[in-house]
Image (cartoon, rainbow, N blue to C red):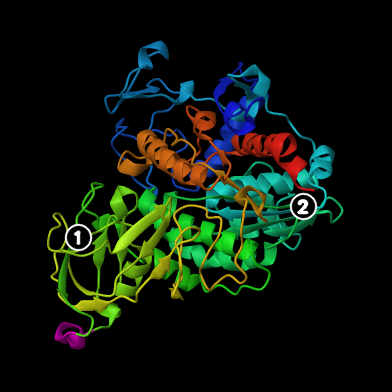
Amino acid sequence: CPDVLTGGAKGRWLTRPLTPEEQKIIDTYLRNERGAYHIPPTYQRDDGRCGDVPYEQSPLYRHMWFKAICNPNGTTPCCHTNTCLPLSVDECRCPTCYDERQAVHTEFATWRPDDARCLVKTFGSQEACGLLNGSTLYFVGDSFIRHVFAAMVILLSNNTVDGALRSDVELSKKARCTGMHQITGLTCRDLLDENRSLCQDTVHVRYVQVFPSQELPLTEPLLNALRHVNKSLVIMGLGIHDDFNFNVVRNKFLLPFLNMRQYLSTSRDTILDVNKVLTNFGRQDSDTRAGNHTQTTLFKRVGDVSGPSLAKNNNPELFLSLLLTLDGRNSTFFKNGSQIVENFPLEVKPEGGPPIIKEDGPSIYSIFTGKAFNFKDSTFTGIKQREIAETVKYINNIGFGGLGTGPHVRHMTSFHTGPHERDTSPLLSPQTEGVDVERLWPRLLWIGAHAPGLLKSPKFKRQTAEGVQEFNTQVQRVLRQWRVPYLDTFSLTNGTVSFDGTHYGWGTNMMKLNMILTYMEAELIKGWD
């Protein structure tokens, strides 16, 4: 298989008729999971409306509503133009049709990749323990990642009844969270044992909950703990709690995390302030951006460094809320002038002067100026306009970035939109040359967001199939630059049964886990020693 993560993830489910016992297992599981959200046992509203309406008694979560569907076992199983109608499966195939009779129960189906060379291996407990012997695995992210973590613990513990649960859980609570419910049960998440040593203490697995991107600081301890730890892997993914807003995820989590990992993995004694990292990527509200087009910031020369204009104010912290689009590659809403100096990779020439900022290579920039300049952001449309007419002094020959920036009078803290061979930041000592980001510890694996299920409300525009795919594409583009492996789970889940429109059950999460283990066996483990 040329690429296990890509080849194994593209394919289709082969289905068969369920036995009466299998159907009973699935029906019981779905009624229990959906009942926790007050979805009626028939899945159909009393008035027969569907599609564009929620269930009357179901909660309206900030990130998750429910779309009413029809009773798949009733007389009107097809939701057609927002009404439950008595149509056959063939008649219920249209852009505005919703029909759970057509959805796949992955617990009783077989995944067949399009590329026959890329079959996904089904691992048993003993084989998985042997594969992961001596490894440390951290699962970092939202509930999508937590469910895969639970599947991993169940497999490695060889206990499908309650293997993911803490040993001290009361029997009355445990009874409601056994079997398939231990992965997904609404009341079972608090019963999970999130820090486990398994396989006779030869494999350590841990889950670190990070829901919205603003919880990035929760990852700092694990990166410090795993720096230079051989056979360590962070399996991660998030986005839904940021409503799949790529700019928020990129600026508040993805780029800061990748920079922290590289800094910490290339030094044994660096102490990194995560708040400083976040500051350098901007604590911005990306929803205030005026589209994705490149904006222009006006630079006007106002006098010499020793002139009276500089005496007026030379504190860069006074440059508040300057929106920079970074040449169309990145949008960041910086809070102060220091962030502008440290993060503005755009070649700009003042009137009659040399370039303020010079691009020396991909993600590598230098600032060469001894003049004071006037910043304004009055040219933007679609956002709150503000005149900023204070002056800022730049130090001659400030180095921004890494290799090739030339001589440095003073080094500034630098953070990067891509991996870098050498960093001139004072955070690292000594400088690290020839960094191979694919061989840093811990290794990384990002699990892409899966497809929305039938119950997903159309009220969440960014959580539609198109919105999720766009988010995944943008995240994958960043990860490719940093050479971080990416597992696409959209094809795997598209058209399968989700118990709440957002999450998936036993079969899907076990398949995700087997994809991860197949990848590790084929491509990752061989480079660990």
What secondary structure prevails in the magenta region? Answer: helix
Q: Earlier in the sequence, mark 2 or mark 1?
A: 2
Side of 95 where 71 appears, left or right: right
The span shown in magenta is: 307-313
Image quarter where the N terminus lies is top right
Picture coordinates of residue 87 (x, y %)?
36, 15
Q: Is residue 128 visible?
A: yes
| SS label for mark 2 | loop
- In the image, 253 versus 16, the foreground residue is 253
Check disc 1 and report its element: helix, strand or loop: loop
Q: Amino acid at mark 2?
A: Ser
Give the camera-side residue of 447 and 190. 447
Q: Which residue is mark 2?
A: 135
Q: Is residue 100 above or below residue 264?
A: above
Q: Is residue 59 visible?
A: no
Instruction: Relative to 99, say whether 331 is above or below.
Output: below
Q: Amino acid at mark 1?
A: Thr
Task: Give residue 268's position: percent from left, percent from top.
Answer: 68, 69
Q: Which residue is mark 1?
A: 297
Residue at (64% x, 31% y) in the render: 4
> Which residue is drawn at the image coordinates 22% and 85% (left, top)?
306
Q: Quadrant of residue 394?
A: bottom left
Few, some or many C-alpha atoms within 10 Å of disc 2 (few <14, some 14-19, many ≥20)? Answer: some
Q: Which of 23/355 is in front?
A: 355
* Residue shown at 19% from the left, 79% from the top: 304
428 over 75 or under it: above or below: below
